[in-house]
Image: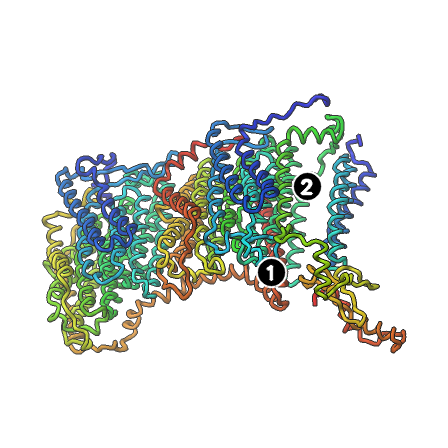
Amino acid sequence: MIGNGAVVLSEGAPSLEPLAAATGVFAYLWLLIALPLLGAAVLLVGGRRTNRWGPYLGVLTVSLAAVFAIVLVVSLLGLPADDRAVGQTLFEWVFVGGFTVPAALQLDQLSMVFVLLITIVGALIHVYSLGYMEDDPDRRKFFGFLNLFIAAMLLLVLADNYLLLYVGWEGVGLASYLLIGFWQFKPSAAAAAKKAFIMNRVGDVGLSLAIMLIFITFGTVTFDSVFAAAGEANESTLTWIGLLLLLAACGKSAQFPLQAWLLDAMEGPTPVSALIHAATMVTAGVYLIVRSNPIYDGTAFALTTVVIIGIITMFLGAIIGSAKDDIKKSLAGSTMSQIGYMVMAAGLGPIGYVFAIFHLLTHGVFKANLFLGAGSVIHGMHGEQEMRRYGALRSVMVITWITFMCGYLAIIGIPPFSGFFSKDDIIHAAFEQNIIIGICGVLAAGITGFYMTRMVIMTFFGKPRWPDDAHPHESKPVMTIPLIILGIGSVVTGAALLYWGNIESWLEPVTGIEEKPLAIPTIVLEGITLLIVLIGVSIAIARYRREVPVLAPKGNLLTVAARNSLYDDAINEALVVKPTYVLSDGSIFVDERIIDGTVEGSARLVGGLGARLRRLQSGFARSYALLMVGGAVMVLVILYLARLP
Amino acid sequence: MNPEVMTAPSIDYIALLPYIIVGAAGVIGVIVEAFVGRNGRRPIQLVLAFGSLIGAFGVLVVNRTTLGLQAEGAIAIDGPGILFMGLILLLAILVALLMSERQLDPAGDAFAPRASALPGSDDERELTTRGYFQTEIWPLFLFSVFGMMLFVTASNLLVLFIALEIMSLPLYLMAGMSRRRRLLSQEAALKYFILGAFSSAFLLFGIALLYGYSGSVEFSVIADALAAEPGQTALVVGGVALLSVGLLFKIGAVPFHAWVPDVYQGSPAPVTAFMAAAVKVTAFGALLRVMYVALGGVRWEWEPLLWIIAGLTMLFGSVVAIAQTDMKRMIAYSSIAQAGFILIGVSTATAEGLYASIFYLVAYGFTTIGIFAIIAMVRDAGGEMTRLDQWAGLGKRSPLVAVSFGIFMFALASFPLTSGFIAKFLVFESALAVDNLGLVIVGVIASVMAAFFYIRVVVIMFFREPVEGSPAAAVPSATTTLALAVSAAVTVILGVLPEPVINLIEQAGVFLR
Amino acid sequence: MTSTDPSAAEAVVFWVCAFLSVVGGIGLILSRRAVHSALWVALTMISLAVLYIANAAPFLGMVQIIVYTGAVMMLFLFVLMVVGVDSSDSLVETLRGQRVAGILLAVGFGLLLAIGLGSALNGVPVVGLDGANGEYGGNVEGLARLLFSEYVLAFEIVAGLLVVAALGALVLAHRERWQPRRTQREISQERTRGGIHPAPLPPPGVYARHNAVDTPALLPDGSVADISVPGPLRARGDLRPVDTAAVAETAALTSGEATYGPAKRPVADDPGTSPGEPS
């Protein structure tokens, strides 16, 4: 860890005894996944017959899952604090050579909060989508994919081993891919889907290799057994596992250097951006790191890397968010930045795990709120996403405006809105660990204040800049009611979780907790943070209070760079895409051009199909045969060499 | 031994019944071709083919507990051998379903009305309008299956070689029988034949060297000789090397892969399915048996060889497939890459590696058949449409077909909950069990690169607007539909519930000597 | 051959035959004409047969001569005769580097194997076949016993291979007729009534230098009679070009317009000097 290396193993390390078998209401744990999965199956297999009632079925399954999740949390609360983890084995999934991987679920405190977030926010977004996707001919498919996503995401957080987690991990990736490219008539959407998929695959390499490494090191992939043995493993192995898991997290959570896909992912319908690319899926990386905390506890190097990645992304996202004129892309930059916060917090070790999750929860609520608000605006503006063409919308879209403001105040961290508590806790923890990290956190909070204020002013204040025939209007109740609920959530979640839900002690059995004394009193720190935020807000007001030009001004170097997402595409192109193609083309060149090209050339000279065919055959076959002789020589050489030692 | 008296060789014909059924059906098929009128041939051939394949499979299941060396030690009917034969028979039944398809091509089936007619000649047109069909493919097909069954159970090098030729000769012929694009098809057949003969020469040379070393062609005697004499001579090295060249050629491993794309592209789709699925299974079966049984004593020598070949094969196949624009060529390179992954399992030289390879072959075989069933369905009047951009918008026009194809692509890209995922997992796991992390890393990287082109197909099918003239999948007859449904079901079931199959493979145990 | 050391005579036989068999192999590759290649192969096979016999395997040696040299190669020659003895392939290599790489790799491959095998087999005692042959009372008896005991399955499944080979040849070559065979009467009726060629078609041309079926005959007026070449060859475009200059020269000579003497025409124009290229 940076500065002070003392790593205290958390006292509340996961229990070594097997999980309590699921009984009572927990015996139906599988229902959580089965319900949305059933919905997806009916909608996707049922075809056009389900067009009429299908979307409602989609909403129903997720809502039932949400209700069941609430029942589960109440039941968990009824158990003693140390026994709040139950396991359920569904069936033996992979069984080979004495090595078993059951398809088993595990519900503990960490999974529980995720389940709540996914099902409740998911249900609200499903309802909202009823309105948002009203006119879409492929509505049924949309709801099918959404249900599929919910099922996969629940599997991800409920899995009790890395392999099953991987299934969920790929599942959410698939659903995300399908939903980003949902409007397939837009070539940009298809391209964005592919990009997201490929960058996620890079992350998946990390996860697969990490799982392999875990398997060789510990001989198992079940969380409990791995974590129980993590203390004895040697540090360099743990570091490698930690870094590979971090790579996986970077892919899924759009962290540097795999962040580029998230902005493009905004090509998907807005409810998708809200649910998958803001509230839930992109936080899977944070979940992975926090879940694997016993591994990270043994490796200071990996933890430090986590912090650095988090900080870089935090600023990167904030800068991009400040320059984008597309409301959704600006929000996406913000999401990147906020997840950077969480990753940074997770990298702080036991001091930060709890707060990473805490911020993840509040962020899930207020970012969903902001995205749905943006969606409502876009809906009212008939698909226009450019903030420079908005302005003064507060008068025509009152509910959207008010709820958006709740989310706004929450994200910039004004007390007593939810973001205040969670962000403040992270900054507090960061200062406890290392003052530089703390300062970074405060600065990023300031930039957050800037870009969010910019967004609010450009969208809801100032003069209208929309064309005369735009006629913006408030959305229907089916969209505004979820907005109102989420708006209230943005206000209360923070305080509720902290004081009423007692999130710290709730999560402690899973993550452990640690506190260090801080030189400055908490209240002073909070005051400084608030001050920096307000400075950011003021700068934004000063800049955008006056006229906002419809066409973006040229801007300085940083602005231009930020508008281009800091050239991440160009960098990826140069570093990854080009070399791959060069490699591929090179191989093809050897394989076809040299052999094929010359032959075809001569064949064309001769002309006539028969002659061409004859030449082609002899040409190919003798080259291939030559290659085979070369191969035989290679085989002989390898075998002779293998005998040398 | 007394020169006057000779004991008759003991051959247990009951144990050999599966081979006899298929081989005899082939012979009867030839007689049918000679003596039955034109119109009567097809029904008889169909009955013979399906009857013999299903019958042989049934006998195999009934006989599954009679294990042992048969026919003077020429073939070994053991657990893996029975598994391989069963798998070959099942795949062959699916291929036969594809071969009997007569609804997709308006002119009839997928095969040229007469292989001897000059491409594009009046003769050929006349044959087509008269509705002639080449029913000789059925006996050829059965003989090929017969050769495959012998190939995977051969326990001496002589039988191994003859079985290889029995399997290959019909394939060379069938490759040249495509109804459409005759020239391409004939070219493929000739290339396959020439290169196949070339590789057979290597194999024979290797056999000769091993015979020179051990004085026998029996696997068990060779193994004993290797065990008795730890210091190996160049005879063994040369023998191992040349034998591997011959077998790796059939597998399509780099650098013996050059024939694969051309032959896959030129052959009729059902035959390509047969080559990609059954031949690969067979070649791996034989490779596993030769390496594990006969050459197990020098595994320290061939293990590094297989590591290198596996690495090369995975990387080369995956990288080159990215730049392909033709569906069949892309699948061909993909099958090269897949062979590399299976070689990882082979190269471990452990029982776990054996099981993992068999599971991989099961998963890969069924998926491949499904893929070619669909390739045969996506067509216009001129034949199959194999250019990738012609598949644009298939998801809109034929959603069910496109979804099935998507499942197969996801399986090859080893997505969780498909058979490909479990297969890759088992193979990697078996390599990790012998601490071969390097090969696994190469494998994971290759599989990520491979995911790119598999998913590109999905993108093209679902996310690209159909262009002018891009097809809907033709409606196939019940046989193709059945083959497709079975492949898709196996692909999914093996991903969700692989355990019964894994158990079956583990219970089969290891090779007999 | 009872001694354990090969006699000097056997060594001489070996080196001569081994040399000849390799020469035959190289000749096969380097010949432009298929007939020459076939004859080179025959040389290789006969050399091998002598080697087998010298190695106490008379049966194999005889089979080699009867089956390969006698049957297979002669069949080959028949086919070549029908197609045209003179047909030859261009040996110009169109692929850059193919030949160099091929030679290098082949030499490398040969060296790797030869060095390895040479070191491995150096000093291995010579056993000879006498023991093996004597065990069953002779070479042929021993082979028979092996074929019908240890290798009985291999022997049996070879039948399958032969059936496939025969079937394959049929599939590739056999044409079923879809019309009833025309009788001689019908053919002659058609010929006379059609009025095109009442008489038999002209046979291929017979010249001092060419007389294969692909050489067209000349009509009295000196023009080329394409129909004198069999249809399949015509369809394939395998007509040998007629040296029209030579024809003109002959015509001039016979008509008395010219006298014998040095060639008056430039040799470079002679298309007959490159007989292999299809026109």
Classify residue B379 as left or right of residue A121: right
Tag 2 secondary structure: helix
Q: Mark 2 is on which residue type?
A: Ser
Would you call the spot at circle 1 few (<14 residues within 10 Å), some (14-19), or many (20 or more)?
A: few
Classify residue C250 as left or right of residue C112: right
Mark 1 and mark 2 residues within 8 Å of each other at the beta carbon: no
Spot occupied by residue C240 in the image (x, y as percentages of width and height):
74, 64
Residue A272 in sight in this render: yes
Q: Mark 1 is on which residue type?
A: Asp
Spot occupied by residue A416 in the image (x, y as percentages of width and height):
10, 58
Q: Residue at x 35, y 55 (%)?
A: B399
Tag 1 secondary structure: helix
Q: Residue at x 58, y 31 (%)?
A: B220
Q: Nearer the viewer, residue B510 or C112?
A: B510
Spot occupied by residue C110 in the image (x, y as percentages of width and height):
67, 48
Q: Chain of mark 1?
A: B
Classify residue A79 as left or right of residue C258: left
Asked which quadrant contains residue A478, the reply is bottom left
Asked which quadrant contains residue C247, the reply is bottom right
Residue A181 numbered tag: none
Q: Residue at x 74, y 55 (%)?
A: C82
Spot occupied by residue C103 in the image (x, y as percentages of width and height):
67, 55
Do the residues indicated by labels 1 and 2 lie within the same chain of the protein? no
Q: Chain of mark 2?
A: C
Mark 1 and mark 2: span between their CA atoms? Answer: 62 Å
Q: Nearer the viewer, residue A335 or C30?
A: C30
Task: State the residue position of label 2.
Answer: C119
Residue B324 in sight in this render: no
Task: State the residue position of label 1.
Answer: B122
Classify residue A486 as left or right of residue C48: left
